[in-house]
Amino acid sequence: MLDVDGRRALIETVARAVIDHADELTQLDQAIGDGDHGINMKRGLEAVLADLDGLAQKPMPEALKGIGMTLVMKVGGASGPLYGTLAMTLGKELPEPADRAALAKALAAAIEAVKARGKSDVGQKTMLDVLAPVAAALADGGDPARAAAEAAEATVPMRAVRGRASFLGDRSIGHMDPGARSSALIVAAAAAALSPEARS
């Protein structure tokens, strides 16, 4: 179970990982989307960091709900509602304290909520193509960060079926999906912050 310092470190590590890669996310989105994914995610996560002290004081499920609300309000485009839904559903489904199995179960529920919100599914070159393998890795005892990185890479040869990238048809092939990349960044940062070494 994370204490206040642990929650603070987790939230800050994840937010900074995405903020630090905002330019990369923008470049990925310029290739197949609106070009605003990095800017929007940075804005939303800077708003999360502005409330870091308050969020860290809350139990993790409540902190996740608060993060989700902030992302919905502050992140533009499709990313805000989708990441907001992900965080809020995780908060709703996650027990406190949570073990690996509980996290896998909560993430599976959150993925279903994102599918419904985005009217999308795995295999359509979206963030779901990273989140689903991560949930499987959590359930099967695998490495979530490695699964996320490999899954993001696997979106490069895919043809986009959902979102702005779908308008490009075959021209969306050959580019990593920006949402898949931001999801992989979040998973890797969370795994690092939750590692025994980081918490010792």
Image: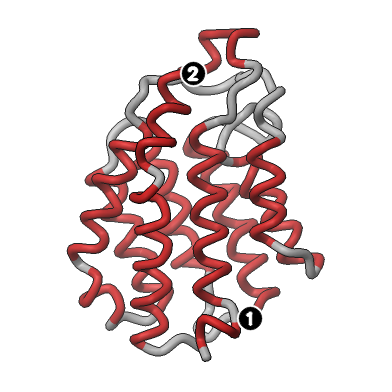
Query: Callout 1: few (<14), some (14-19), or many (20+) C-alpha neighbours within 10 Å?
Result: few
- Inspect the image, locate mark 2, and give the three-letter code of the amino acid beneath it: Ile
Residue at 70% over, 56% down: 146
Residue 97 horizontal/vertical position (percent): 53, 86
Give how far across and how far down residue 158 sits, in percent.
69, 23
Point 78% across, 65% down: residue: 142
Q: What residue lies at 36% left-to-right and 36% top-to-bottom?
A: 23
Residue that carries the numbered disc 1 in the rendered image? 99
Horizontal side of 150 relative to 22 (left or right) equals: right
Residue 17: x and y, percent? 42, 56
Residue holding disc 2: 32
Marks 2 and 1, Cα distance to the nearest angstrom?
A: 37 Å
- In the structure shown, which secondary structural element does the residue marked by tag 2 occupy? helix
Residue 176, percent from left and from top: 59, 29
Who's the residue at 40% across and 66% down the image?
13
- Does 179 sit above or below residue 49? above
In the rendered image, the vertical position of residue 99 relative to residue 113, given as above or below = below
The numbered mark, 2 or 1, whose residue comes first in the sequence reads 2
Residues 58 and 93: in front is 58
Q: Secondary structure at mark 1?
A: loop
